[in-house]
Image (cartoon, grey):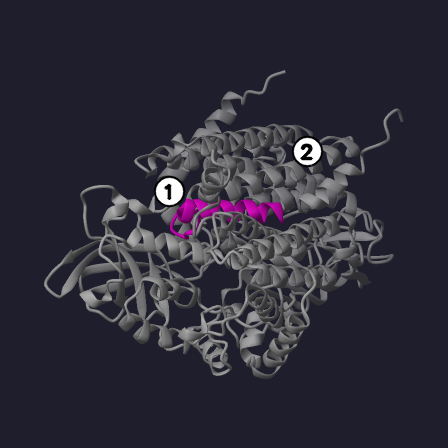
Amino acid sequence: MDFRYTEEQLALRETLHRFIARDYDFARRRALVSSPLGFSAEAWAQYADLGVLALPFPQEYGGLGGNPVDIMVVMELVGQGLLLEPILSTVVMCGGVIRDAASEAMKRALLPQIGAGSLQLAFACYEAAGRYDLASVACRARPSGDGWCLSGRKNVVLDAPSADGFLVSARVSGQVADSEGISLFLVKRDAPGLTLRWYPTQSGGRAADLRLEDVVVEADAHVGSPGQALEIIERAVDRSTAALCAEAVGIMTALNEATLSYLKTRKQFGVPIGSFQVLQHRMADMYIAAEQARSMCILATVNADSKDVAVRRRVVSGAKAHIGRAARFVGQQAVQLHGAMGVVDELIVSHYFKRLTVIDLTLGDSDFHLARFGESLRPAGQ
Amino acid sequence: MDLTYSPEDDAFRAEVRAFLDARLPEDVRAKVLLGKRLGKDDFMRWQKILHARGWGAGRWPQRFGGAGWTVVQDHIFEEERAEAGAPPQIAFGLRMVAPVLMTFGSVRQQEYFLPKIIAGEHFWCQGFSEPGSGSDLASLRTEAVSKADHYVVSGQKTWNTAGQHADWIFCLVRTRSEGRPQEGISFLLIDMKTPGIEVRPITLLDGEREINEVWFDEVQVPVENLVGEENKGWTYAKFLLTHERTNNAGIGMCKRGLHTLKEIATDQLVNGRPLIEDVRFRDRIAEVELELMALEINNLRVLSAAAIEERPIGPEASMLKIKGSQIIQQLAELRMHALGHDALPYLYEALEPDWVADPLLAEHYPAYAPPVSGQYFNLRKTTIYAGSTEIQKNIISKLVLGL
């Protein structure tokens, strides 16, 4: 057993650390949030140069053959720097689906482009009525000529405004909540019949609602076997959930550092407020919460690609439920300990807090994952 | 022991309800219920309507133009007001500076200011906190130098709410630097139009601009605007904070928030059923509702005891502030979680009264959604302002428990 990062992972971490310090400080990030694109095109190109965008792909597709722990390293830094670029959507989520399930031709066409930073994709698999249920798909796909014709709605598609294309779940048979009968399609941004309504998110990113009205795609836009996409989707979402957990851990670590520093420097009643026992104990609880969260994150990360679906679901959902709560505690208490300084826009503290909140609400909230984790529980002795 | 409302109380509730039905402007009501931004005009218009009915200041004694309500009547009014979607009254004038003026102010101050507060002509704000003086308020440094017939005030206040709207500010200023810090503080009333005052907005985490820094650069304040005696300001401030806390349970607002939560959880679906029927989420609502039930009675017990014994409310007010602020935060958190993905869009413009969702958005994005996440973020301030939860617990430990 060995919990240490490899030399390569430590080097990647150090590189990203330096990049954030040099090119992505809080002032820069704030400017990016209100820029037309909403993130940095230069940073995206730099990630491509560093190999981050090709990290999880096999070498024959221009990738680096990285594993989920490599992604964990990246996502922790995404959290610490509050990076806005769509690494999760494009590389982990959509890139992961293509790597796992796409045809050889699609892999050859798309994975090198993603790795080079010239293609961005967004994952359009949630619908308004379904909440966090990926099987709740009302969007329909019917055969049309050699290809398919899609109609339906997808809501709050993260990173959609800048995406060149979308992976869209659509039903080819069965009823809205059936796990069978769901297919996955690659839909280009400029496909006739596709409309976007974009907006900023609560944590400074961008998202959009999608309307598909008789959007026609070619046969080769279909990913995987017809009607069997739910398994592919769940696998990609589980892997992305583990990555999101790592982002949360990165934020909690940074937020605890900021709070600890504030406790040591902010003086009231003539002494640093960190000399008050009630705040010392609170800070100790925040430290424990972040360490527990890191451990759950590690557990989820090393099982994120597990062939045993039951194990993968149990561990990933367990981590997301646990980390959602830890993030809420750490975020709320970091704000509380900063006093009024914790609720101003000017300090990074409130931005970390908002990002933790949004992470809790993304890819299933704590309640959703607690229930999914609970499904694996059996009466003792059985 | 009798927890029933008297026939007079029931009649009063009916009267309040009828008044709210008839006189609360529909546009203001719609803004409040949908969480839209309220402007100064909305608050002042409502205050004037209340004043015309003789209810401009429910708890003020009748000799100052108040309605002279009992604590129970005040509770009934607040409950009905919040439920109907009427805006809260601005506390800075009515519940904060006014009691100080009634108790420690000069007759001239009482005769000039109180009628303007109750009539909605003067909008007040507070100048207490400073960058280096939050929980440790007595360390404040904004100084007022005494000249012949005026003070010259210089310094900086912060975390000031609604200073951009205010006609007047009540300030704690340092008039003596020797001795205990508490014994060199005075309580000044300052006209916001006086030269040398600058209000600089602070953007909060939800993007709203309701909080300010207020800078004073050699601002001249006539000596007749000193309240009571010089260097006794700390006593008046403590008195004020006690009065401020009497409404800190915020029962009416909590009930309104609970009601909205249930509406959202009824409309949102999980596995095709209303979220409110989901056992896990229902339990979460139930737990907060129980806390609120207990707090409502707790609040009435504290207020009744103070009324019967004809004394101001004591340090037990800290308990009401702690619980009330926690409940309002928990309700906001549940409302946000109830929304699921719809909690994620940040639509700043959607809080303007005339905003209409475009068709694509309106297909799934409900009218109640836009303010919800921002409220969760913004309401983190409730356990920080007006004496943080940690400071309130210090008060309970020391003054109630004797530790």
Residue at 18 percent of width and 65 percent of height: B223
Seen in the picture, residue B226 relative to A76 is either above or below; the reply is below
Residue at 19 percent of width and 68 percent of height: B195
Which amino acid type is shown beneath numbered disc 2? Ala
Left/right placement of residue B358 relative to residue A77 reads right
Say whether disc 2 or disc 1 marks the residue closer to the N-terminus. Answer: 1
Subunit under mark 2: A
Residue B9 percent location from the top left of the image:
64, 71
Residue B340 percent location from the top left of the image:
66, 54
- How far apart marks 2 and 1 lie (CA) works out to 31 Å
Magenta run includes residue B196:
no
Please give the label number shown on residue A23.
1
Depth check: A145 or A132 in front? A132
Q: How many marks?
A: 2
Please give the label number shown on residue A304.
2
The N terminus of chain A lies in which quarter of the figure?
Answer: top right
Residue A105 percent location from the top left of the image:
69, 45
Seen in the picture, residue A348 relative to A35 is either above or below; the reply is above
Depth check: A126 or A87 in front? A126
Seen in the picture, residue A92 relative to A311 is either above or below; the reply is below
Depth check: A6 or B299 in front? B299
What element does badge 2 sit on? loop
